[in-house]
Image (cartoon, coloured by chain):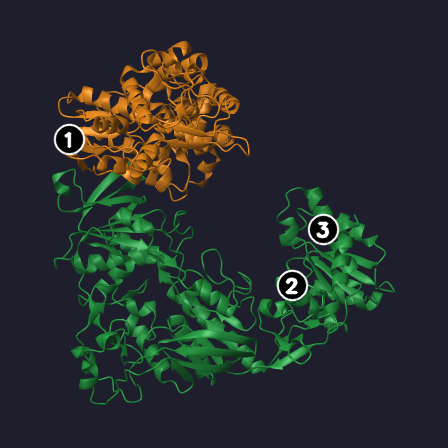
Chain colours: A green, B orange
């Protein structure tokens, strides 16, 4: 061991209620670690993180004159901060602390109680050795830039932006599409209250568009983020709109006259739009963009009609993309989701049979501003007399998405209501389980049953147009099992609605790399803690709002957006933020200048000193991840708090048993 | 006079039963959330009250009444492919069967086949010495160490008079194409597929070990199968040792390659309207869908029509999972449905590539009395007719 004099260590073992103590024999652990020569005192307590627990640690530090503190409890992600604060309060440097995870890494994953107890002792012994060489590291604080970046202009991004802007702070709101609004703008009615989406959304869209504190960048994408909490530098690419928004009055003549038609993404391909277009009539900003891929002038230099008819002279075919740099202190991710279009759709005749619709297509069909002005009609224009709604298409299905998409049951019940109300058609709703755990959701489910919707418990396996009886001729036949009567059923209907689920965006992996927030196996951003920090991420200063973190309905999305904005405001109002002190440094004499560390550093914190021909770490940018120290072939890169001797001491501790 | 408790009817969970099934490799049944997809797609559901979902629930809680139906599954794999929980449902029935077998509760007709498998190495109650009888007047090259392919014939082709025609066609084609192959005659025993799907794990172990021994003794590297059931056993079931690189393929793959390479050039016109029946073990179990269609389409003059339920959604003949040996009453035969589906396309010939499919479909054609209307031929028989410029 490197330390000259043994430092006095206090070990505090937490029961975590029964989470740890039901598997790990706490008494044995305390007994064993008490015998280690470095350990002055070893105590246990039911909840070490509670006030009495914290006071216990503080008391022992004072009374025993402890120089190092170890808490064996849960993950440091959860409570490292809590216990570090106890040390600070007791006038010990917070880096004299080490947390040992005997819950997630031991009690929860070890069935054998003796082995779990042994493991706890080994892990604590390792920490006892390691803390001997811990060094005091200084507190580091930086100023927080009060501006905020919000990525994504759906209801989550809109809500978060408005909260922050209304509090008097600057927001850069970046939206990829030509208008804010997101998926919610595509819906007509919202469950369970059936209030119209437009009535509650468009006023907010309007506020975002005209708020003095919001710099709205539509048709734009974030392409680079550097920096760290409090001080991010963000590069936004403004894609060419080919329309000068300073001059454009939004009169719409260009869209009327444009001869190029393409399928409308906003209307799910049910109708066409022009090559110069606004996403929808209530778009914000309500000015068009030119879709360069489909514009005859931009592709073949023919046409030019829009320029000719524009009295304001706003059409600019020479428009180029523009890179804008902005500085912000925090970032809110509100990048939303896509509706799944799983391969299994073909089993249900989608794409082959008329009148088999996805949920989003039905939303457009039903929308008062949609292609049929909200009339629910079949492809031939007639009203359906029977409609089947099929739950869980591609959701709760290991072949596609294993998770439950959470919103489909409720929107499917909403569809049933709308079909009944608007057409009087018989509705057959095939479900596996109805999930209605929200405020007034179960009541809505009751209302649907009262409205004579025919609920059949069973997942539909197939939709076919091959009839076996006369009744089935010319119909879509839905085949499934009514599992409650144990009978196979064939139901002939006129329309089939496939309740498809929520899926992460196709470019979630790119966004994940950009913002350095990991995604789960399904591509949704991972929160810092699923319960206690559901809006924070592992990247400090970056928050998540809405469905980019997983399936959520509108109330939850808005709540999380308000949560994200309040966390951003907390940072701003504090004005300063403490940053990691356990950074890395380069031993100049050892650095060979190979630059390997520079290529590996995920935070772009290392620069090359051309004069000295060595790498230099910018400590403000360094997050102390240790990648450089692990990469450096000559051992020149060192990580504070993770020095080689500390790691070796730790290994020695584990092996000492 | 009965007591009141004798009159009262209820089902009580018998969790020991459920646990026994779980331990017999049926653990996936725990994952079922009762959506009914299996029941909807199960081919049996078209003909009778057969409900895999309900059976799983009964087995899971040990409710009585699942025993008889557990023998029905033909291992066609459609339910497994469609199951949102990816539950290997045929395996659950296999697990149940292994327990029922231990209780001697096996349908008697299947028991006869299983006994024959143990005693003679084939399910057809034939002597093991007579396996190669068909080669007496029809010479087939013997497999020796160093021969490229071992032609694994399949019991049904070796013993059944109808299927012998098929294997003879195979031999003729392989000879024409000068494929380096050989046959091991009486050393072959059944691949064990039926034993396994009947839950006869011991019998399966014995048969597979015998074959493995021979493969090792002769240093076999490539096995050419005629029956998709043998193919599946070798490819997906047999426990070859690590480093034993034995490749198994099906004849249709060989034919397709030979035709593509122009080694075989089917020039004789076949002026028939034909359809193709995907054997479950070739298609769903082993993803071979394109080769047989490619071969059919390479035959000049042929008119090829597809049925409604094809490829991944193909409809079973009823012969798998031991179904070939089980008595089924008239009106409840899967083969009947399949044959009628073929007839409705207007086809005169059903082409297929599995000995069980041949047996089941031909039995249904006879049973339905429509042998004037439609017949069954294998891919080999079709190809040979064209190569020899003979009528199909």
Disc 1 is placed on an element classified as loop
**Chain of the residue where label 3 is placed in the rendered structure:** A
Q: Residue at x 43, y 67 (%)?
A: A546
Residue B10 appears in the rendering: no
Q: Is residue A27 above or below residue B255?
A: below
Can the viewer see residue B115? Answer: yes
* CA distance separating discs 3 and 2: 30 Å
Q: Secondary structure at mark 2?
A: helix
Q: CA distance from mark 1 to mark 3?
A: 76 Å
Chain of the residue on which disc 2 is drawn: A
Question: Which residue is the site of mark 2?
Answer: A631
A515 on left or right of B270: right
What separation in Å lies between label 1 and label 2 (alpha carbons)? 70 Å
Q: Which residue is mark 3?
A: A120
Residue at the spot x=30%, y=34% of the render?
Answer: B263
Q: Nearer the viewer, residue A179 or B232?
A: B232
How many labels, in total? Answer: 3
The location of residue A8, given as percent across then percent down, is: 83, 63
Same subunit under labels 1 and 2?
no
Percent coordinates x, y for residue A231 in the rendering: 56, 79
Mark 3 or 2, nearer chain start: 3
**Residue highlighted by disc 1:** B272
Residue A382 image label: none
Against A23, is B367 above or below?
above
Using the image, determine if residue A392 lies above or below residue A208.
above
Q: In front here: B210 or A517?
A: B210
Q: Nearer the viewer, residue B302 or A572?
A: B302
Quarter of the figure with the C terminus of chain B = top left
SS at circle 3: helix
């Amino acid at each position: 061991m490197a330390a000259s004099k043994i430092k006095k260590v206090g070990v505090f073992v937490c029961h975590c209620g029964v989470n740890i103590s039901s598997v790990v024999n706490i008494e044995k652990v305390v007994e064993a670690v008490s015998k280690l020569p470095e350990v002055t005192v070893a105590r246990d307590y039911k909840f070490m993180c509670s006030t009495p627990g914290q006071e216990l640690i503080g008391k022992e530090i004072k009374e025993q004159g402890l120089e190092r503190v170890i808490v064996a409890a849960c993950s440091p992600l959860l409570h490292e901060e809590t216990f570090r604060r106890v040390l600070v309060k007791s006038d010990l440097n917070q880096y004299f602390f080490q947390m040992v995870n005997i819950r997630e890494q031991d009690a929860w994953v070890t069935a054998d109680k003796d082995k779990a107890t042994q493991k706890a002792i080994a892990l604590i012994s390792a920490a006892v050795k390691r803390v001997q060489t811990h060094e005091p590291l200084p507190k580091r604080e930086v100023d927080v830039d009060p501006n905020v970046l919000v990525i994504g202009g759906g209801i989550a991004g809109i809500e978060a932006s408005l909260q922050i802007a209304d509090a008097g702070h600057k927001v850069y709101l970046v939206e990829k599409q030509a208008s804010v609004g997101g998926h919610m703008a595509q819906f007509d009615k919202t469950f369970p209250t059936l209030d119209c989406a437009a009535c509650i959304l468009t006023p907010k869209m309007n506020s975002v568009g005209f708020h003095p504190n919001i710099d709205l960048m539509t048709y734009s994408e974030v392409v680079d983020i550097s920096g760290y909490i409090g001080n991010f530098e963000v590069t936004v690419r403004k894609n060419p709109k080919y329309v000068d928004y300073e001059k454009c009055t939004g009169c719409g003549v260009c869209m009327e006259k444009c001869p190029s038609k393409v399928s409308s993404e906003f209307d799910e391909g049910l109708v066409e739009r022009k090559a110069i277009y606004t996403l929808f009539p209530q778009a914000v900003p309500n000015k068009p963009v030119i879709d360069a891929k489909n514009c005859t002038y931009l592709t073949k230099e023919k046409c030019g009609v829009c320029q000719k008819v524009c009295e304001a002279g706003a059409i600019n075919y020479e428009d180029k993309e523009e890179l804008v740099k902005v500085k912000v202190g925090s970032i809110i991710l509100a990048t939303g989701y896509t509706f799944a279009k799983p391969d299994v759709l073909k089993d249900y005749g989608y794409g082959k049979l008329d009148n088999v619709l996805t949920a989003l297509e039905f939303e457009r069909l039903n929308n008062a501003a949609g292609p049929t002005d909200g009339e629910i009609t079949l492809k031939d224009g007639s009203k359906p007399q029977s409609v089947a709604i099929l739950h869980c298409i591609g959701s709760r299905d290991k072949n596609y998405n294993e998770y439950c998409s959470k919103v489909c049951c409720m929107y499917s019940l909403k569809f049933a209501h709308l079909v009944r109300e608007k057409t009087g058609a018989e509705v057959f709703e095939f479900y596996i389980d109805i999930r209605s755990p929200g405020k007034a959701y179960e009541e809505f489910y009751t209302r649907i049953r009262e409205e004579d919707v025919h609920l059949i418990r069973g997942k539909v396996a197939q939709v076919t147009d091959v009839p076996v009886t006369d009744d089935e001729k010319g119909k879509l036949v839905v085949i499934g099992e009514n599992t409650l009567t144990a009978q196979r059923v064939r139901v002939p209907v006129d329309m089939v609605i496939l309740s498809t689920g929520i899926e992460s965006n196709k470019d979630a992996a790119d966004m994940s790399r950009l913002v350095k927030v990991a995604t789960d196996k399904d591509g949704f951003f991972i929160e810092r803690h699923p319960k206690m920090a559901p809006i924070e991420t592992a990247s400090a200063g970056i928050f998540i709002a809405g469905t980019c973190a997983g399936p959520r309905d509108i109330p939850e999305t808005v709540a999380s957006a308000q949560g994200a904005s309040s966390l951003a405001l907390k940072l701003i109002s504090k004005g300063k933020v403490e940053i990691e002190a356990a950074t890395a440094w380069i031993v100049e004499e050892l650095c060979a200048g190979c630059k390997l560390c520079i290529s590996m550093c995920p935070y772009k914190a290392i620069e090359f000193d051309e004069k000295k021909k060595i790498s230099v770490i910018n400590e403000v940018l360094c997050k102390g991840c240790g990648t450089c120290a692990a990469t450096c072939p000559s051992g020149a890169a060192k990580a504070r708090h993770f020095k080689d001797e500390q790691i070796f001491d730790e290994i020695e501790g584990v092996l000492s048993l | 006079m009965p007591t009141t408790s004798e009159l009262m009817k209820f089902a009580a969970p018998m969790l020991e039963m459920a646990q026994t099934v779980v331990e017999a490799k049926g653990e996936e049944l725990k994952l079922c959330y009762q959506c009914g997809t299996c029941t909807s797609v199960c081919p049996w559901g078209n003909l009778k009250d057969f409900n895999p979902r309900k059976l799983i629930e009964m087995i899971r809680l040990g409710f009585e009444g699942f025993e008889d139906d557990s023998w029905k599954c033909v291992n066609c794999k459609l339910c497994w492919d469609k199951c949102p929980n990816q539950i290997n449902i045929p395996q659950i029935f296999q697990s149940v069967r292994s327990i029922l077998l231990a209780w001697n509760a096996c349908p008697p007709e299947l028991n006869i086949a299983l006994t024959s498998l143990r005693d003679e190495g084939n399910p057809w109650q034939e002597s093991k010495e007579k396996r190669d009888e068909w080669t007496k007047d029809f010479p087939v090259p013997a497999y020796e160490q160093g021969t490229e392919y071992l032609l694994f014939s399949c019991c049904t082709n070796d013993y059944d008079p109808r299927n012998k025609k098929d294997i003879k066609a195979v031999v003729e084609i392989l000879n024409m194409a000068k494929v380096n192959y050989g046959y091991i005659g009486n050393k072959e025993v059944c691949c064990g597929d039926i034993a396994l799907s009947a839950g006869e794990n011991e019998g399966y172990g014995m048969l597979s070990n015998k074959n493995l021994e021979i493969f090792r003794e002769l240093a076999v590297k490539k096995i050419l199968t005629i029956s998709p059931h043998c193919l599946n056993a070798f490819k997906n079931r047999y426990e070859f040792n690590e480093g034993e690189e034995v490749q198994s393929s099906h004849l249709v793959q060989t034919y397709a390659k030979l035709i593509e390479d122009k080694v075989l050039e089917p020039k004789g016109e076949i002026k028939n309207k034909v359809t193709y029946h995907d054997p479950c073990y070739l298609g769903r179990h082993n993803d071979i869908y394109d080769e047989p269609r490619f071969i059919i389409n390479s035959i000049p003059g042929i008119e090829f029509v597809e049925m409604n339920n094809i490829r991944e959604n193909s409809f079973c003949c009823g012969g798998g999972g031991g179904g070939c040996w089980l008595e089924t009453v008239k009106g409840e035969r899967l083969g009947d449905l399949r044959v009628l589906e073929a007839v409705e396309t207007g086809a005169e010939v059903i082409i297929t590539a599995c000995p069980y499919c041949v047996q089941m479909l031909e039995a249904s054609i006879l049973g339905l009395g429509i042998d004037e209307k439609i017949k069954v031929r294998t891919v080999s028989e079709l190809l040979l007719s064209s190569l020899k410029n003979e009528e199909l």
